[in-house]
Image: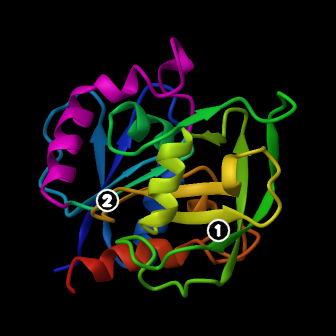
Amino acid sequence: MSARIGVITFPGTLDDVDASRAVRLAGAEPVALWHADEDIKGVDAVVVPGGFSYGDYLRAGAIASLAPAMRTVVEAAGRGTPVLGICNGFQILQEAGLLPGALTRNEGLRFICRDVELEVASSDTAWTGEIEAGSRILVPSKHGEGRFQASDETLQELEGEGRVVFRYVNNHNGSRNSIAGVCSDNRRVVGLMPHPEHAVETLTGPSTDGLGMFTSAINSLVS
């Protein structure tokens, strides 16, 4: 039986269809999850996709982090369920307390949409186990509030524990330590600003480099 990976849709979500396609291409069954439902249908892993959940009112990801589905996701993450937050999903996971730091307005205060090269800083997570540490992947990036910020103490903790997962090769948004993605202390929850789900087919993406994140999650469930 194939793995079942849930993809949450919030009001304002844009990339749930793309995330579901990535899950399917990786060999798992995508399961549609609705923000207002506490039931996440017994999925094996969860993707919190990008977009502008609840119109980014109050603060990006703040309202979505309180949705019934997210309450259940937080509980599932506590039991070790792999969770991936992409772009707005990363912001939601931070607001829900599953990942450290904050994502603020880009340096220069401009929305940036371009393909970016990322260095894989860690392959020791549920979502990067099949990707060689030190390698580079090319994926699209599109955000206005993606500048990773954290206190000096938190940065030291992330660096010291090997919890920085991705770094920008060209730090286009001014993130501290060029951080593009981080993970939880148990390495089951990962968040990143760029979009691996948009780099799974040569027809539509700049590469297929993003697919490895989804196959990694599938393999982590059977390892």
Q: Is residue 19 above or below residue 98?
A: below
Q: Which residue is at the front of the view, 74 or 200?
A: 74
Residue at point 41% right, 70% down? 127
Residue position for label 1 = 199
- Name which quarter of the figure residue 97 lies in: top left
Q: Where is residue 166 in the image (x, y as percent from the top left)?
A: 59, 65
Residue position for label 2 = 185
| Tag 2 secondary structure | loop
Q: Is residue 50 above or below residue 5?
A: above
Q: What residue type is labelled 1?
A: Ala
| Tag 1 secondary structure | loop
- Name which quarter of the figure residue 31 lies in: bottom left
Q: Which residue is at the front of the view, 14 or 153?
A: 153
Looking at the rendering, the stretch of residues picked out in magenta corresponds to: 51-80
User: Is 67 situated left or right of 207 in this image?
Assistant: left
Residue at point 49% right, 37% down? 91
